[in-house]
C-alpha cells in the first residue's frame, strides 16, 4: 500500500483549514497477487488522530455527542463546539464531543450506546438503520431544503469534462460509508460496468470532504466526489475554491445527513434532545450555534426521505 507521509497529509489539512471550512454538513480486496496489486493502487490519507480512550467512555452523567468525520477533526470541533456547549447547558451536565476516523466507528459507538446523540452521514444512517442500531431524531434544513447532492469535482484547468473521462486518473473518496463521497460514485461506476480498482489509476480515502477538496486543489487527486453543501458553503467563504476547482457532475437529490440517537436510548432523554434541537432557532444562543453550522433550523424528517 502506498501511503502519503504525515508531512504531506498535514500540508493538505493546513491548506484546507486555512480556507475556513467550518461547516456541519450541511448530509474490498481478495488474497494473493490481486490483494498486492489493489493495495498498490490504494492511498489512504488516514493519519487522523483518535481521541484518547478516556474521552470515549466518559462519566455516565455527561452528554456524549458523536460527530461523523464529514470535516477533518479540527474543523469539526470548531464548527460543533457552540452547539455542544449549548446542549450541555440546557441539560445541566457536561457535554463531550466524541470523534472517530471513520463513519463505521461512530456507528459502532451508537450501536453500543456509548454516545447519546450522533450527527452522521446519510450513508452511515442507512447502514445503521438497516442494522437497527439507531433511530432518526431530526434533520437539518439548509437553504429551505432537507436534501443535498454529490458533486464530482476536478481541478479547474483539467481537460476532464465528464465522469467517464476520469478513467486511469487518481480519484479521492471520503469514507466507505459516505453517501456522496463513496456510494454515489461507486454507483456511477457500477452503471458503467466498472469497479474503482480497474477504472481509476489509483484511489484515495481522505476521510473528510474538506480533505477531498484540498486533495484536488493540491494536485494529489485528479477528481473527487464531495458533499454539495460543504462545497458550496466553502466556496462562498473562499472563492479561491471555486476558482481552482470545477463541478463536472451532479447527482440527484438525497436525504440530508441526519441527527440520530442510539436505539436503546431512554425515551425521556430522546424526547428532551429532540425538543432542544427543534427549538434551537427560537433561542438567541441557539441561533448562534446554528449559524456556525450553516443550518437554518432542525426539523422533523419527511416520510420516505431516506427511501424507507
Image: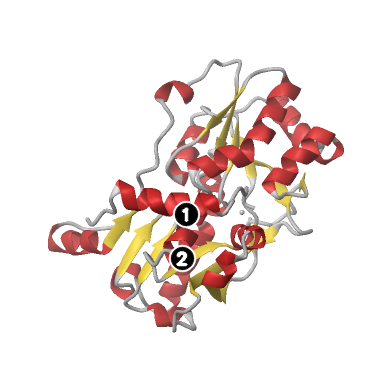
| Secondary-structure class at tag 1 | helix
C-alpha separation, residue under disc 1 versus residue under disc 2: 9 Å
User: Would you name the residue on which mark 2 appears?
Assistant: 217
Residue that sits furthest to the right in the current view: 282
Q: Nearer the viewer, residue 244 or 92?
A: 244
- Residue 44 visible to an observer of this rendering: yes
Q: Position of residue 160 (x, y in %)?
A: 45, 82
Q: Earlier in the sequence, mark 1 or mark 2?
A: 1
94 displayed left or right of 98? right
Q: Residues within 10 Å of mark 1 (few under 14, many from 20)?
A: some
Residue 261 drawn above or below residue 225: above
Labels 1 and 2 touching (C-beta < 8 A): yes
Q: Position of residue 224 (x, y in %)?
A: 46, 66
**Which residue occupies 17% across, 56% down?**
31
**Which residue occupies 57% across, 65% down?**
240
Residue 51 position by quadrant: top left
| Secondary-structure class at tag 2 | helix
Q: Residues within 10 Å of mark 2 (few under 14, many from 20)?
A: many
**Which residue occupies 39% across, 37% down?**
49
Q: Total of numbered circles in the picture?
A: 2
In the drawing, what numbered circle is on residue 15? 1
289 displayed left or right of 81? right
215 displayed left or right of 143? left
87 displayed left or right of 218? right
- Residue 45 visible to an observer of this rendering: no
Residue 5 drawn above or below residue 87: below
Amino acid at each position: 500500500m502506498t501511503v502519503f507521509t504525515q508531512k504531506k497529509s498535514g500540508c493538505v489539512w493546513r491548506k484546507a483549514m486555512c480556507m475556513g471550512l467550518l461547516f456541519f454538513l450541511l448530509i474490498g480486496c481478495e488474497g494473493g497477487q490481486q490483494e498486492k496489486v489493489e493495495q498498490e493502487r490504494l492511498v489512504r490519507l488516514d493519519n487522523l488522530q483518535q481521541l484518547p480512550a478516556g474521552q470515549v467512555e466518559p462519566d455516565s452523567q455527561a452528554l456524549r455527542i458523536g460527530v461523523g468525520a464529514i470535516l477533518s477533526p479540527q474543523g469539526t470541533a470548531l464548527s460543533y463546539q457552540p452547539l455542544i456547549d449549548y446542549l450541555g447547558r440546557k441539560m445541566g451536565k457536561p457535554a463531550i464531543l466524541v470523534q472517530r476516523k471513520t463513519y463505521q466507528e461512530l456507528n459502532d459507538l451508537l450501536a453500543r450506546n456509548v454516545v447519546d446523540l450522533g450527527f452522521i452521514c446519510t450513508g452511515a444512517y442507512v447502514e445503521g438503520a438497516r442494522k437497527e442500531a439507531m433511530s432518526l431524531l431530526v434533520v437539518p434544513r439548509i437553504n429551505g431544503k432537507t436534501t443535498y447532492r454529490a458533486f464530482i469535482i476536478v481541478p479547474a484547468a483539467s481537460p476532464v469534462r465528464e465522469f467517464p473521462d476520469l478513467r486511469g486518473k487518481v480519484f479521492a473518496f471520503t469514507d466507505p460509508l459516505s453517501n456522496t463521497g463513496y456510494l454515489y460514485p461507486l454507483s456511477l461506476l457500477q452503471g458503467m460496468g466498472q469497479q474503482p480498482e480497474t477504472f481509476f489509476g489509483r484511489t484515495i480515502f481522505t476521510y473528510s470532504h474538506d480533505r477531498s477538496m484540498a486533495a484536488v486543489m493540491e494536485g494529489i487527486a485528479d477528481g473527487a466526489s464531495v458533499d454539495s453543501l460543504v462545497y458550496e458553503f466553502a466556496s462562498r467563504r473562499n472563492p479561491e475554491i471555486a476558482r481552482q476547482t470545477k463541478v463536472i457532475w451532479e447527482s440527484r437529490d438525497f436525504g440530508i445527513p441526519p441527527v440520530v440517537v442510539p436505539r436503546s436510548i431512554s425515551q425521556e432523554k430522546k424526547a428532551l434532545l429532540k425538543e432542544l434541537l427543534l427549538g434551537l432557532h427560537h433561542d438567541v444562543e441557539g441561533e448562534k450555534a446554528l449559524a456556525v453550522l450553516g443550518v437554518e433550523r432542525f426539523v422533523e424528517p419527511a416520510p420516505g426521505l431516506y427511501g424507507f
